[in-house]
Amino acid sequence: MMKKAVGFLYQSMLLAVGSLLCAVAVRSMIMPHDFLARGLTGLALLIYYKWSVLPIGLLYLLINIPVFVLGWRFVGRRFVAYSLWGMAIYSLALSLMDWEIPIPDPMLAAVMAGALSGLGSAVILKSYGSSGGSDILCVVMTKLFNMTLGTGSMLINAVVLTLSALLFPIDKVLYTLVFVFVGKQVTDEVFHGLAKRRTALIISDQWKAITEALTTVHRFGVTLLHGQGGYQGTERPLLYSVVPRRSVSALKRVATEIDPSVFIAIMEADDVTGVEVGNQPHW
């Protein structure tokens, strides 16, 4: 029971911090310059700017009702439940915040808002939920149409920005594109970049000794792949390993000390999913 309570508090903290950062970006930097935003926040802002029928927080809440109905049908219940909690925090923050960070330069405001929103989104991605909106729609499209989350997000943003271009001055839409781009870059860097890993492919006649040194001394995970030379057709094993970026030099040193003629290819591994690594989908 205590473990569940601590887990709930930790997830709530992630959702609260991430949602508050996103809300600050919208209320204090986006709205003072009449920019829009990505996803359903952008749709709520579009309606708010054009008609001002309801407060922005309430508009976002109402737009999310059909989205959560779909989510309850097609997405994991835990994800939807935590997302409801995250959406409530985000909607409340949008409603209660009423202050502006004085950044007169619109380009700087778009960049700063994107950075803050991207950081908030990365924190939310570490939780079991979301702040509602397009996150749930993207997961639903993944479940129904086998579409990647990135493709789903791109389609939703394309619809929102196309509507914005028809209703608002083009400069506002272009500043919004800057905000969206910066937010995506910061989210990727924070979510994946803080624990960046590298993929190593190793080819050597001394593969047994290299495998033993990497697994027993340095505790690297190594997978043995069966390869065949393209020219001579010689059978030779390939060692495959995913290691933290800081450990690449150690891996190279171990392999070259055992076999000076070893072949090593190091590649970026931007998104690695696994029980020990993290980044598993929570939905």
Image: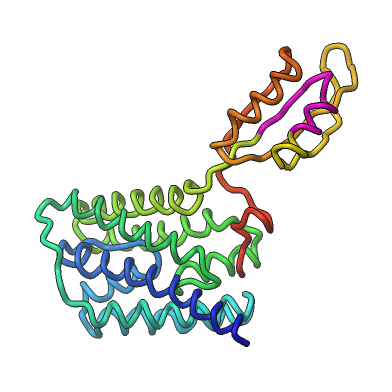
Residue at figure coordinates x 73%, y 37% from the top left:
217
- Seen from the viewer's position, the closer of residues 149 and 190 is 190
User: Where does the N terminus fall, quadrant-wise?
Assistant: bottom right
Is 134 within the magenta? no
* Image position, residue 230 (x, y; %): 82, 17
* Image position, residue 281 (x, y; %): 62, 63
Here the colouring is rainbow
Is 208 within the magenta? yes
Residue at figure coordinates x 83%, y 35% from the top left:
224
Residue at figure coordinates x 73%, y 26% from the top left:
202
Q: Quadrant of residue 75?
A: bottom right
Give above or below for 100 relative to 161: below
- Seen from the viewer's position, the closer of residues 86 and 243 is 243
Label tally: 0
Please state if 277 lies on the left or on the right of 36 as rendered: right
Please state if 113 lies on the left or on the right of 197 as rendered: left
Give above or below for 229 relative to 161: above
* Image position, residue 112 (x, y; %): 24, 54
Give above or below for 176 relative to 22: above
Residue at figure coordinates x 66%, y 59% from the top left:
146
Farthest front residue?
217
Magenta-colored span: 200-213
Please state if 147 lies on the left or on the right of 11 as rendered: right
* Image position, residue 242 (x, y; %): 66, 40
Q: Quadrant of residue 223?
A: top right
